[in-house]
Amino acid sequence: MFGGKLTTRQFAVLMNMDDNERELAKQARLDDFKNEHHAKDQIRVAEEFVESYRRRKVVDGEWPEDQSHQLMQQEMDKVVTKFPTRSSYDIHIRESKKNQQNLAMLRNSSSLFEREYYFDEGLGESLNEHTATLKKDYPGITV
């Protein structure tokens, strides 16, 4: 029994596990496997993003090639200083998305076309004449 690989039944008897515990152990191993691969994928994507950002800065001429790795490290240090934990970064992203949604909700058809400018009566036309001209030229707008 101890000379080679144990069968599922032998392992269960040896570890005094019933069927539910075995299923839970299998599920835990599967979850660990999925989490490990998900973490590896996140690391790979982050590395690709950093490298593409560095290359874009070099190609655009903002950074010289020989100093690009050092400058990239400085940029990453700034980000780590600004967002020391993953949760602080997630909060920042969540708040940014909320602000964008609120801005989008404020934009309706009348506010999208709303214009504000300063009127100078010293140019020879009074404010009342100007608003009357606008109302005549653009019927249906609010002045």
Image (tube, helix red, strand yellow):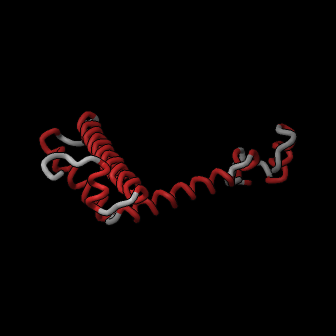
In the rendered view, tell whether residue 38 sits above or below residue 90.
Answer: above
Name the image quarter holding residue 90.
bottom left
Q: 130 or 48, which lies in front?
A: 48
Residue 120 can be seen, yes or no: yes
| Residue 67 x, y percent position in the rendering | 14, 45
* Residue 44 relative to residue 122: left or right: left
Identify which residue is drawn at 71% across, 53% down: 119
Q: 47 or 100, which lies in front?
A: 47
Name the image quarter holding residue 78.
bottom left
| Residue 130 x, y percent position in the rendering | 80, 47
Marks counted in the figure total 0
* Residue 55 relative to residue 129: left or right: left
* Residue 99 relative to residue 111: left or right: left
Identify which residue is drawn at 15% across, 52% down: 2
| Residue 56 x, y percent position in the rendering | 29, 37
In the rendered view, tell whether residue 17 sits above or below residue 62.
Answer: below
Identify which residue is drawn at 23% across, 37% down: 58
Name the image quarter holding residue 25.
bottom left
Q: Residue furthest front?
A: 1
In the rendered view, tell whether residue 48 sits above or below residue 106.
Answer: above
Identify which residue is drawn at 78% across, 48% down: 125
| Residue 97 x, y percent position in the rendering | 54, 54
Residue 53 can be seen, yes or no: no
